[in-house]
């Protein structure tokens, strides 16, 4: 028997037993052993356990996609040799006492063609089937109400909620701690054991709670599909990333679940814990694993002085970090330096319930040109932040800088926010967004006539006085001219709009939005706006009119996301351009700009994994 299986120390100090022994029995700790020769393989056996689970689908995940793969399945070995498994991944249903037996004859290869496939190099998975999988209990069998997915580290043949924690803990943390509180909480618990056979009531209580938590996160449509007549667990429902997110969620919440079980066990011991009555965490997940905006780098001060200036001369003045809930909703936007919260963009985010990925183009640019932003940025720490309270329909803006026209009354966070945003919803989205501060009340009233997912008309009132009205015309598509069709940015649609404001520059009333809507794109390339406060800064030379120019990754580039092609790579703040014909190749970024914002994205799973470490 092998004494040590490489296992993350993220959660526990494993209690290992039986090193050096030879046995015909399955080890209690679930690890593989050396007494079986794989040149003439016996069935690959093990157990599925919450309690012992009968009629659960088990498979050896050879292709690493976390779901059963039928044959013919092509496996590429480390040597580059391709091996075909006609029947797909070894699979079976668990039987009495949770025991399963996988036929691995197909893994034995002709040595002249390829080496044998060692099952110990791959993880086992087990899936419970609602109403079909049965948990064996001392007082009788009980059908499992809800599906959940379990796994185990490679070579481990027990598949339990605890081995699932070990498996995904290894993937998430690569040997670092999940949290400071989780390690002592699970000290002495063997994550790989058959805790029923060993009589470990503490481990069993944790496992039951973990199983209930995992079942609560399994998507309802998939649960219904597995409960249907004829379903046997070989259905390919969960993507690899969805399975990873489910495992990651267990890792992130394990310490809280352990604490809840420990508290419930304190009066009478772990055997008396009624897991069904525990108030476990309720955590929604976005199993589509979208790419999310996680960082903006703002450059808006020239090393030579005044703006506009060459992009190469701009210095970083702020970095914005975007933090998310596991369901993809924005939780906090923090700025090292200064930000410029946009009411129109906040309204757009509110209209999709805070789920940034639903915007397709995430967080249209806004910028502070204040010289104080660079001052704040050079001092470490968060200087401004937006906190989203979706339950109470509020967004709170706090600042410790002098960028916001005297809003900050302290150099530290705490106390009432400087601005509170609230909103009124109607069927087609946000009807009204209100920003309340000590000095004024700003109300943005949305007008969705001729609106697109990126832009809506609006009316802005400040202290009940109308300040600006933006009205959209119809979106007009056009055919690109022949010699530009293959270009990365082509103006293939335009939308005229009118803008009437008290302080708008002369001649700034008739404007045009420019889009690239070829193929699956819906990319905003340019839009104009007026901002006399920006233009009034001493180092800014402008009559009050500005353009935002958006640049997107080219198809096939490393930053291009196939299923999310409308993610901005960079945005440039320029002076207003004269409208040109539709159908042309979009112009290069001009030499003189007021600022640049670079966008950085990350998959939700990657973001959550970083937060777990």
Image: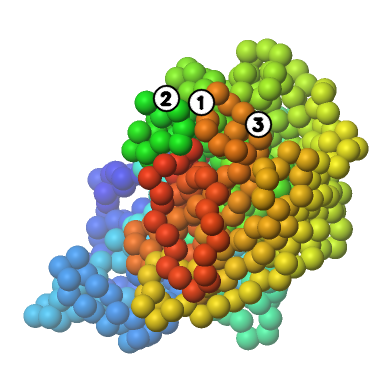
Point out which mark residue 403 bears.
none
In-image side of 532 versus 445 (left or right): left
Discs 3, 2 touching: Cβ within 8 Å: no
Judged from the image, the secondary structure of the residue bearing numbered disc 2 is loop
Residue identified by numbered label 3: 533
Q: Nearer the viewer, residue 252 or 502?
A: 502
| Residue 223 higher or lower than 275, as above or below | below
Point out which mark residue 305 bears.
2
In-image side of 143 versus 518 (left or right): right
Residue 261, image quadrant? top right
Discs 2, 1 touching: Cβ within 8 Å: yes
Category of crowding for the residue at label 3, using alpha-carbon neighbours closer than 10 angstroms: few (below 14), some (14–19), many (at least 20): few
Category of crowding for the residue at label 2, using alpha-carbon neighbours closer than 10 angstroms: few (below 14), some (14–19), many (at least 20): few
Residue identified by numbered label 1: 539
Does label 2 or label 1 sit earlier along the sequence? 2
| Residue 442 higher or lower than 352, as above or below | above
Residue 77: x, y in percent? Answer: 21, 70
Q: Nearer the viewer, residue 342 or 188?
A: 342
Residue 474: x, y in percent? Answer: 71, 71
Does label 3 or label 2 sit earlier along the sequence? 2
């Amino acid at each position: 028997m092998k004494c040590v299986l490489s296992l993350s120390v993220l959660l526990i100090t494993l209690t290992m037993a039986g090193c050096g022994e030879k046995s015909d029995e399955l080890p209690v700790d679930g690890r593989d052993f050396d007494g079986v020769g794989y040149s003439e393989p016996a069935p690959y056996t093990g157990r599925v356990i919450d309690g012992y689970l009968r009629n659960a689908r088990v498979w050896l995940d050879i292709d690493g996609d976390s779901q059963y793969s039928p044959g013919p399945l092509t496996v590429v070995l480390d040597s580059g040799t391709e091996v075909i498994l006609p029947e797909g991944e070894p699979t079976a249903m668990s039987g009495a006492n949770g025991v399963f037996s996988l036929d691995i004859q197909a893994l034995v290869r002709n040595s002249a063609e390829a080496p044998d496939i060692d099952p110990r190099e791959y993880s086992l998975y087990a899936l419970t089937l609602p109403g079909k999988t049965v948990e064996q209990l001392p007082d009788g069998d009980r059908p499992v109400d809800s599906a959940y997915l379990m796994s185990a580290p490679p070579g481990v043949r027990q598949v339990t909620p605890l081995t699932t924690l070990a498996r995904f803990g290894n993937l998430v943390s690569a040997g670092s701690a999940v949290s400071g509180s989780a390690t002592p909480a699970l000290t002495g618990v063997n994550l790989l054991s058959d805790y029923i056979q060993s009589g470990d009531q503490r481990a069993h209580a944790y496992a039951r709670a973990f199983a209930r938590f995992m079942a609560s996160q399994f998507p309802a449509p998939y649960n219904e599909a597995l409960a249907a007549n004829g379903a046997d667990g070989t259905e390919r429902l969960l993507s690899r990333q969805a399975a990873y997110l489910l495992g990651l969620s267990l890792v992130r919440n394990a310490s809280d679940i352990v604490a809840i079980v420990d508290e419930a066990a304190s009066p009478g011991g772990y055997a008396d814990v009624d897991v069904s009555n525990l108030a476990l965490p309720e955590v929604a997940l976005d199993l589509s694993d979208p790419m999310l905006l996680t960082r903006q780098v703002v450059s808006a001060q020239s090393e030579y002085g005044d703006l506009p200036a060459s992009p190469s001369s701009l210095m970083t003045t702020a970095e914005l970090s975007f933090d998310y809930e596991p369901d993809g909703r924005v939780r906090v936007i923090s700025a090292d330096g200064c930000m410029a919260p946009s009411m129109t963009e906040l309204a757009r985010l509110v209209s999709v319930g805070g789920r940034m990925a639903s915007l397709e183009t995430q967080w249209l640019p806004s910028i502070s040109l204040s010289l104080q932003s660079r001052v704040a940025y050079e001092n470490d720490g968060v200087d401004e932040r937006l906190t989203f309270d979706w339950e109470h329909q509020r967004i709170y803006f706090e600042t410790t800088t002098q960028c916001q026209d005297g809003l900050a009354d302290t150099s530290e966070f705490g106390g009432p926010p400087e601005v509170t945003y609230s909103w009124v919803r109607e069927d087609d989205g946000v009807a009204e967004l209100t920003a309340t501060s000590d000095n004024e009340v700003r109300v943005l009233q949305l007008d969705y006539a001729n609106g697109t997912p990126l832009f809506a008309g609006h009316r802005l009132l400040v202290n009940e006085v109308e300040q600006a009205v933006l009205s959209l015309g119809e979106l007009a598509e056009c055919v690109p001219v022949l010699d530009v069709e293959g270009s990365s940015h082509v103006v293939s649609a335009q939308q005229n709009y009118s803008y009437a404001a008290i302080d708008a520059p002369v001649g700034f009333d008739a404007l045009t939005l420019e889009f690239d809507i070829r193929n699956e794109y819906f990319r905003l390339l340019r839009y104009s706006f007026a901002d006399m406060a920006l233009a009034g800064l001493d180092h800014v030379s402008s009559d009050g009119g500005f353009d935002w120019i958006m640049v997107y990754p080219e198809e096939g580039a490393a930053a291009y996301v196939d299923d999310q092609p409308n993610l901005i790579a960079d945005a440039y703040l320029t002076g207003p351009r004269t409208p040109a014909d539709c159908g042309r190749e979009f112009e290069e970024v001009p030499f003189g700009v007021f600022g640049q914002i670079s966008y950085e994205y990350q998959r939700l799973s990657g973001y959550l994994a970083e937060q777990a470490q």
